[in-house]
Amino acid sequence: MLKSLTTISGSLKVKMPLVKGACLIIGDEVLNGKITDTNSRFFAKYCYELGIHLREIVTVGDEHEQIVDTIRRLKADNDFIVTSGGIGPTHDDITYESVASSFGLECKLDEECQRRMRKISDPEARHQGDALKAFYRMATLPNGPNVENYYVHDDLWVPIVSIEKKVYVLPGVPQLFERLLTGFTNTLKGLYGLEKDTAHEYQRYFVKTPMSESEISMFLAKIQKRGTEVSKEIKIGSYPHFGMGFNTVSILGLKKDDAFLKQIVKETIQTLKGTEISATEEQQISDSR
């Protein structure tokens, strides 16, 4: 998986390439505006903090073929793909079946998940007939030799379903999504060697400038060109804050290039009459809009 070996000073060292991530949000209710997706934003921050290169976020409806086609496309180019939504008890919750199909697998009632359901939720005391059958749809999971179910909290029966240690199926309820993903962090670090590799962690700086985006565009284009020559992971962005009298420049890169990033920050402050601000300050500014 992901690992490559290099010899340094006669010793063997494990070197991990950058982990490429993607997120698939599933649900008609997101596309028709009934609910607001917050899971993709949480996942983006999660990847950033772990040094995972999030390359794509996709939203699709409850359509089997669309989910299958999207999963197949994403898994061809990414290492860590998370899905969110579509694993409830109703007819349009088809994520498990669709993800299984994308790997040529089928679903079956998982005995361990059912056992946990009975212990934690006692569905048979509350449901019978078709209602009980519908409840157990949530324990009807992809099945195969490359499927692994991770139960990260003892008080939750819902697992993170993993296929080929590449696609990870999570619920769409934000509280569950965030709790499961956070609880999965140490396991994820072990699977992808993230605890061994700090070179791929990100570093970000922000500079606030009173100059307009038009006035700073040429300078940003020049430093982006210089940054790309150092690393493709260096990204220079600008964020307008309308009506506030200033804009923010974002300088993002890998920690291994921190010396270069700091030099860019210094130049940006000097050239754009700027002031460095923290990520917390930038977030507060963005949230107040």
Image (spheres, grey):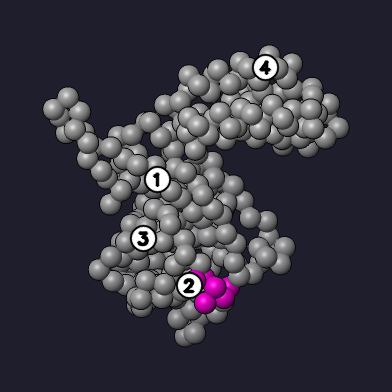
Q: Residue at x 35, y 46 (%)?
A: 188
x and y percentages locating residue 127 in the rendered image: 48, 77
Q: Give the distance between the C-alpha atoms of the residues marked 4 and 2, in whole angstroms.
A: 47 Å
Q: Which residue is mark 4?
A: 269
Using the image as rendered, state which of residue 287 and residue 47 is in the foreground: 47
Q: Residue at x 54, y 63 (%)?
A: 85
Q: Is residue 110 magenta?
A: no
Q: Helix, strand, or loop for circle 2?
A: helix
Residue 162 disc label: 3
Residue 280 in sight from this viewpoint:
no
Lower position in the chain sequence, tag 4 or tag 1: 1
Q: Residue at x 33, y 45 (%)?
A: 192
Q: Which residue is mark 1?
A: 19
Residue extending farthest bottom: 129
Q: Give the distance between the C-alpha atoms of the residues marked 4 and 1, in whole angstroms.
A: 32 Å
Lower position in the chain sequence, tag 2 or tag 3: 2
Q: Which residue is mark 2?
A: 68
Judged by its main secondary structure, the magenta piece is: helix
In the rendered structure, which segment of residues is drawn in magenta? 62-69
Q: Give the distance between the C-alpha atoms of the residues marked 2 and 3, in whole angstroms.
A: 16 Å
Q: Amino acid at mark 2?
A: Val
Query: Is label 4 or label 1 in front?
Result: 4
Lower position in the chain sequence, tag 3 or tag 1: 1
Quarter that holds the C terminus: top right
Lower position in the chain sequence, tag 4 or tag 2: 2
What crowding class fits label 1: few (fewer than 14 Cα within 10 Å), some (14-19), or many (20 or more)? many
Lower position in the chain sequence, tag 3 or tag 4: 3
Q: Amino acid at mark 3?
A: Ser
- Do labels 2 and 1 touch, CB within 8 Å? no
